Image (spheres, rainbow, N blue to C red):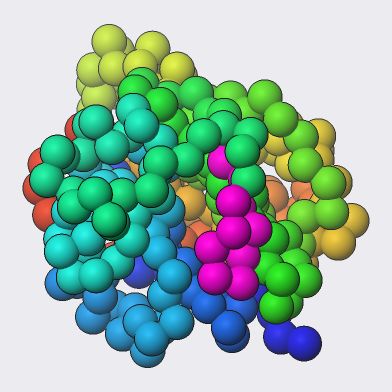
Amino acid sequence: MGRIDVKCLASGSTGNAYAVDDGESALLLEAGLPAKKILSGFLPLLPRVAGCLITHEHGDHACGAVGLAGRGIDLYATVGTFAGISSTVPAHRRHEVKVGVQFHLGSWIILPFETEHDAAEPVGYLLYSLAAQEKLLFATDTYYIPNTFRALNIVMVECNYSRDLLEENIKAGRILGLLKSRLLRSHFSLDNVKGFLEANDLRECRRIYLLHLSGGNSDPERFQREIRELTGIVTAVCGKGGDACGPSSEGWG
């Protein structure tokens, strides 16, 4: 029996693109780069790709969605997210998901769950691989996750900023104070992540991936160290990478 393999092509406010692979089928997570860049970056996985899951419509997560659909990749997102992406997604490539309603895709069982962000109908995804018999949680661009989860093997979670670095940047005039309230109500901070991890069942967790770090309000080495010290679990930071395919709705993040 294999394990879930996680690949990060890009992570951050300039673009997000990830993939998970259990050896039988692979899933793309987010489409925040040009489709050509995503497909070339995940080229070895393409024969096994069952579809692309999108959390919300902001450009740094979905700007490559139409291009992927045009190249034969099925898209999975909420009604609200599809409304914000484009009306040009072919009907046979568009699959609407609902919070709390699980579905099968390739060798995966997928459960969308509620997140909180300044988007139309954002979600996170709980993935269970039938091939690897492992469970992975994927949550990004949210300031709150109302659910808790059991028996997680892999956690991929946003860790956008720390409150102290944000306050320092506001005081120094590096970012506008008016952006503070928006950040606090749309993204997971380091403290949010710690609280979330402490509230969930990590007894079987073997790896944590920190996603979507802010360019100016984060410290990758510190975040990685503090999460590792808190949980005792191997922790990795997904870097930016890739090339953005348009202006981000969160360019300051």
- Front residue of 165/22: it is 22
* The C terminus, quarter of image: top left
Give, as a single range, the part of the protein colored magenta.
103-113
Residue drawn 71% across the image and 85% down it: 2
Determine if the magenta segment contains residue 249. no
Q: From this view, report whether residue 172 is shown above or below residue 220.
A: above
Residue drawn 34% across the image and 54% down it: 75
Residue drawn 38% across the image and 86% down it: 47
Determine if the magenta segment contains residue 112. yes
x, y (%) of residue 73?
Answer: 29, 66
Residue drawn 56% across the image and 46% down it: 125
Res 218 visible: no
x, y (%) of residue 8?
Answer: 42, 68
Q: From this view, report whether residue 94 is shown above or below residue 129.
A: above
- Front residue of 177/129: it is 129
Magenta region, main secondary structure: strand
Looking at the image, residue 246 sits to the left or right of residue 73; the answer is left
